[in-house]
Image (cartoon, rainbow, N blue to C red):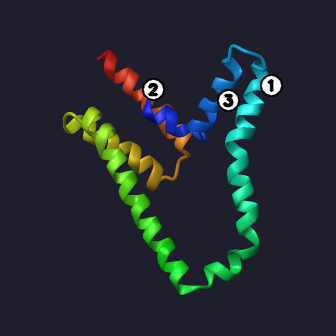
Amino acid sequence: MTGIAQAVPGPLFTFSAYLGAIETPSPNGWVGASIALLGIYLPSFLLLIGVLPFWNTLRNQSAFQAALRGINAAVVGLLLAALYQPVWTSTIKNAYDFLFALAAFGLLVIWKLPPWLVVLLAALVGGLLSLL
């Protein structure tokens, strides 16, 4: 399930549209979904438009470059923590699970298959293996 959620571009955005569509008071449906999406996308676009004129100046400053390197390192740590708990601890139970995950990783990194295809293949192979 986590793989499916990660394959969808922006699960929070998808969930936002879903909530806007099913909202009981009007507007709902397509109009509610559009309003919800606009409400979740608009702040980031406004921030981008506000920072864009200063971007070239900022990215040439060594302090800003150091801050971005630190932010990138922190994001890698957070992603590793999210991979370990709950994904790794709830799915990797034995050597076969590890080999299955390693094969999926190889499809992504070595053969450079698109993530959606790796998720689909992993779901199909996992479903077939569960029948054995």
From the viewer's perspective, tell me whether residue 48 is left or right of residue 132.
right
- In the figure, residue 50 lies in which quadrant? bottom right
Residue at the location (76% across, 62% down)?
A: 49
In-front residue for pair 75/115: 75
For residue 124, the mark is 2
In the rendered image of this protein, does residue 7 appear above or below residue 78? Answer: above
Nearest to N terminus: mark 3 or mark 2: 3
In the rendered image of this protein, does residue 18 appear above or below residue 97? Answer: above
In the rendered image of this protein, does residue 89 appear above or below residue 33? Answer: below
Q: Residues within 10 Å of mark 3 (few under 14, many from 20)?
A: many
Dot in front, 2 or 1: 1
Residue at the location (47% across, 49% down)?
A: 108
> Residue 94: in sight, yes or no?
yes
Name the residue beneath numbered marker 1.
31
Q: CA distance from mark 2 to mark 1?
A: 36 Å
Q: How far from the left and from the top, in percent, is residue 132? A: 29, 17
The amino acid type, in three-letter code, at marker 3 is: Ala
Name the residue beneath numbered marker 3.
17
Q: CA distance from mark 1 to mark 3?
A: 10 Å
The amino acid type, in three-letter code, at marker 2 is: Leu
In-front residue for pair 129/34: 34
The N terminus lies in quadrant: top left
Q: How far from the left and from the top, in percent, is residue 46? A: 74, 55
From the viewer's perspective, tell me whether residue 50 is left or right of residue 102.
right
